[in-house]
Image (spheres, rainbow, N blue to C red):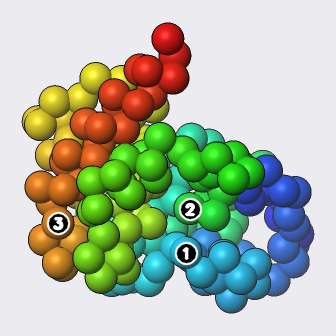
């Protein structure tokens, strides 16, 4: 059975094990290694990508569930050389420490800001991605900064 979907606005098809998790397809078949393996049980968020604009944990999504869907990974977040506001804020606030979880953190933050342009601390706390280095204060600051950048871009 062949399935069809898009990854970072590029049409894809797959004719293989449709029970394979999306994470492994992205990393092993498409060579998009920005999405990380963390726990394999959808708890840590290192594997977060967008499916049809919503943040999901790709380690538990079988390929059979993405027929006709639009997948966006960290590699597809920037528009050409122009960083997404969340990426820019991450740099400005010097968020990353080891960086392993950051692609998932960024994708979760983008989803939050797409749903809520003016998040408060409580809203940000609903992001459940884990950072083993504990950069949560910088992550929070960067999300608030990204919201500000987005507002300024709309003016």
Mark 2 Cα-neighbour bin, 10 Å: few <14, some 14–19, many ≥20: many
Distance from Cα at disc 3 to Cα at disc 2: 19 Å
Distance from Cα at disc 1 to Cα at disc 2: 6 Å
Whether pointer 3 and pointer 2 mark residues with C-beta atoms closer than 8 Å, the reply is: no
- Left of 91 or right of it: where is 68? right
**Secondary structure type for disc 3:** loop
Return the x and y of residue 38 as percentages of the image width and height: 36, 83
- Left of 148 or right of it: where is 78? right
Residue at left offset 55%, top offset 75%: 34
**Secondary structure type for disc 2:** helix
Residue sitting at the far top: 155
Whether pointer 1 and pointer 2 mark residues with C-beta atoms closer than 8 Å, the reply is: yes
Mark 1 or mark 3: whose residue is earlier in sequence: 1
Q: Which mark is residue 34?
A: 1
Mark 3 or mark 2: whose residue is earlier in sequence: 2
**Secondary structure type for disc 1:** loop
Residue at left offset 74%, top offset 51%: 80
| Residue under numbered circle 2 | 74
Asked whether 140 or 126 is in front, the reply is 140
Mark 1 or mark 2: whose residue is earlier in sequence: 1
- Regarding residue 72, the answer to whether it shows in the image is no
Residue at left offset 68%, top offset 88%: 28
Indicate the quadrant where residue 3 lies: bottom right
Q: Nearer the viewer, mark 3 or mark 2?
A: 3
Q: Nearer the viewer, mark 1 or mark 3?
A: 3
Distance from Cα at disc 1 to Cα at disc 3: 19 Å
Residue at left offset 79%, top offset 50%: 9
| Residue under numbered circle 3 | 135
Residue sitting at the far front: 92
Return the x and y of residue 70 as percentages of the image width and height: 70, 49
Task: Name above or below for residue 21 compared with residue 9.
Answer: below
Mark 3 Cα-neighbour bin, 10 Å: few <14, some 14–19, many ≥20: some
């Amino acid at each position: 059975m062949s399935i069809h979907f898009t990854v970072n606005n590029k049409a894809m098809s797959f004719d293989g094990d449709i029970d394979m998790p999306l994470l492994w397809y992205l990393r092993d078949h498409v060579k998009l290694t920005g999405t990380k393996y963390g726990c394999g049980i959808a708890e840590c968020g290192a594997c977060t990508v967008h499916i049809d604009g919503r943040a999901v944990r790709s380690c538990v999504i079988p390929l059979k569930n993405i027929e006709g869907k639009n997948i966006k990974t960290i590699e597809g977040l920037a528009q050409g050389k122009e960083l997404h506001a969340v990426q820019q804020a991450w740099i400005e606030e010097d968020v990353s420490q080891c960086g392993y979880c950051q692609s998932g953190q960024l994708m979760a933050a983008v989803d939050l800001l797409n749903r809520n342009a003016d998040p408060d601390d409580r809203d940000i706390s609903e992001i459940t991605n884990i950072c083993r280095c504990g950069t949560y204060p910088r992550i929070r600051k960067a999300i608030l900064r990204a919201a500000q950048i987005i507002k300024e871009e709309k003016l």
